[in-house]
Image (cartoon, rainbow, N blue to C red):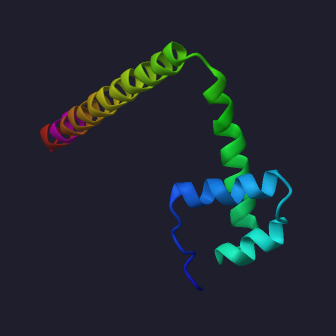
Amino acid sequence: MPRVPVLPAEEKARIVLNLLSGRTTLSQAALQAGVSAQSVSVWRRQFIEAGHTGFQPLAQRSEAARRERRLLGEIQGLKAALGEAHLALRATASHRAYSLR
């Protein structure tokens, strides 16, 4: 299975903009980029979905980024706590099984 070439984000954006403006078709864009039409379709979807954030005020985008970083930190803390609880539970169960012998 051939590997899809890695294109820089700027190149993907140029391809998608040409596609959206009607300067090229999906199949032409895929052929020129050396990727499948499905890949170009995914880029187009990603571009459109991410593009709406550009219309939000900068303060709102910054706040969303801060909130995301904070939540990712909380997730890491919760994963660590869950891992510690799991190990403690296993140790307790192992100790009980040993004591019953």
Rendered location of residue 51, percent (x, y): 66, 36
Give the answer, above or below, for where 36 lies relative to 68: below
- Which quadrant would residue 91 be assigned to in this image? top left
Quadrant showing the N terminus: bottom right
Quadrant showing the C terminus: top left
**Left or right of residue 19, residue 93 in this image:** left
In the image shown, does 2 or 85 lie closer to the viewer? Answer: 2
Query: What residue lies at 58% left-to-right and 61% top-to-bottom?
Result: 11
Q: How many marks?
A: 0
Give the answer, above or below, for where 13 lies relative to 57: below
Rendered location of residue 74, percent (x, y): 35, 23
**Left or right of residue 69, residue 6 in this image:** right
Quick check: is 19 in the magenta stretch?
Answer: no
- Which quadrant would residue 48 be assigned to in this image? top right
In this view, the residue farthest toward the bottom is 1
Highlighted magenta segment, given as a residue range: 92-96
Rendered location of residue 30, percent (x, y): 73, 72
Give the answer, above or below, for where 47 lies relative to 92: below
Give the answer, above or below, for where 44 lies relative to 78: below
In the image shown, does 92 or 31 lie closer to the viewer? Answer: 31
Quick check: is 94 in the magenta stretch?
Answer: yes
Query: What residue lies at 62% left-to-right and 29% top-to-bottom?
Result: 54
